[in-house]
Image (cartoon, rainbow, N blue to C red):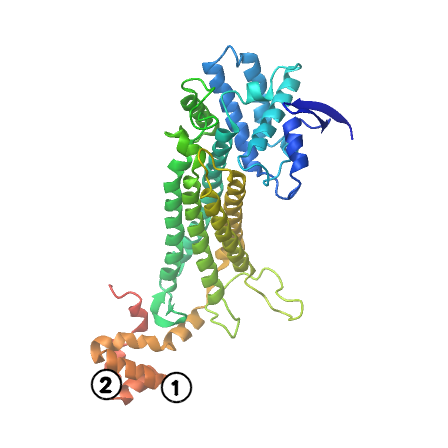
Amino acid sequence: MEYKIEHDSMGEVKVPADKYWGAQTERSHENFEIGVGIETMPREITKAFGYLKKAAAMANNALKPEKMTKEKLSAIKKACDEVIAGKLNDHFPLVVWQTGSGTQSNMNANEVIANRANEIAGKKLCHPNDDINMSQSSNDTFPTALHISAVYAIEDKLFPAIDTLVATFAKLEKENMKIVKSGRTHLQDAVPISFGQEISGWRTSLERDRKMLESSLPYLKQLALGGTAVGTGLNAPKGFDKKVAECVSELTGKKFVTAPNKFHALTSKDELVFAHGAIKALAADMMKIANDVRWLASGPRDGLGEIRIPENEPGSSIMPGKVNPTQCEAVTMVAVQVMGNDAAIGFAASQGNFELNVFMPVIAYNFIQSTRLLAEAMLSFNKNCAVGIKADKDKMHHNLYNSLMLVTALNPYIGYENAAKTAHKAFDENISLKEACVGLGFLTAAEFDKVFKPEAMAFPQK
């Protein structure tokens, strides 16, 4: 391998000649051999750095044109565009497990953009610290990149996945609204419900989760940029914080604003804890929905068997013909991972000391992973399972009329205690509710038939 010699404030360092990174990136690359090639800093963070470095150059050009010249700005913008497009991903090798402020990832961006900008300009025009990092600090750029990437993850990944599954459930809900089945509470028989009503609960859960995620966005759209090292804004020109937020908004098409208190923005990660709490709520609901689906589809003969789901692949290496609810299992595993990530994010956010939180890379890693996994799992579940859900009307009808909890309809006519006696007699003697009720003398056969209408119990207000 051929090398080039780069230098920083600590001296010279050998760097692979075909890489744009410099001395500080190389030091981190060599000093943190933890998860190399596996737990690399998320590309969503790299992309966010592309946006914020371009925005910073634009703001500096507007406020300090004598230092951020048009020539520098032009080269920097082109280099940043390549970062944003992912063309320079191979030049961002650093792992999550590095300095807790993300300083080395900030310098990785500074060095790559500077060296690529110089190559574009055809001369040594830009310096990583003096130009690319102008008016900034790692302490305000990394939380800014974290917020930008979080907003993108929620709005461009999670929301479309939620909307897709909601649309599927809305269709199934309408198609199955008149199919009445046995309800279940505590995993025991309960009073009737329509399958459409049951699905409406799934749909509304996802819609509510989306609303909760929406409520977190105004906080995530506040940027720390402009606070520099400790929140005072040292070495940044007046108005830089507002101007750079405007530039980020212009570049991303998303409305970002400067954080009103930079001391809070640098040290507290409460916005991310709050937002990920909503992501965890979504994961919890997806766990519930996936479990409902696989319980309802259990069988095919010895389970509930009330719905049929797509058969996607063989389920056993030894049992011929076995098919498993694998999409549901994938969703539930993802939900478990997200819940674990939530714990990690909460612990990490609680560790801010004085003017800085130094657990930001692990927050970024877990937050981005949660949104990516959930979005992809929901889309997979929708495509390979939800759209193919079919009600087994015969099994639903059989289970409905076999349920002892239909006795609840008799409460207004024979009272709770007599209804309980009827249910126990029917269960103990393995007879129908009608036989038990008539046998106990609570109602005649004709009276029973007049008031006992299981399908109507699902729509008591009509």
- Above-or-below relation of 417 to 77: below
Identify the amino acid type marked 1. Asn
Q: Which residue lies furthest to the top in this view?
A: 66
Label 1 or label 2, whichever comes before in sequence order: 1
List x then y, in percent, for residue 334: 52, 53
- Above-or-below relation of 388 to 413: above
The residue beneath circle 2 is: 442
- Residue 182 visible, this orientation: no
The quadrant the N terminus occupies is: top right
The residue lying toward the viewer, choosing from 73 and 366, is: 366
Residue 453 located left or right of residue 228: left
How many numbered marks are there? 2
Rate crowding at label 2 as few (under 14), some (14 to 19) or many (20 or more) other CA atoms within 10 Å.
some
The quadrant the C terminus occupies is: bottom left
- Above-or-below relation of 272 to 111: below
- Above-or-below relation of 70 to 390: above
Q: Element at badge 2? A: loop
Residue 371 located left or right of residue 109: left
The residue lying toward the viewer, choosing from 409 and 363, is: 363
Identify the amino acid type marked 2. Phe
Quadrant housing residue 397? bottom left
Q: Residue at x 64, y 18 (%)?
A: 118
The residue lying toward the viewer, choosing from 18 and 163, is: 18
**Label number found at residue 430:** 1
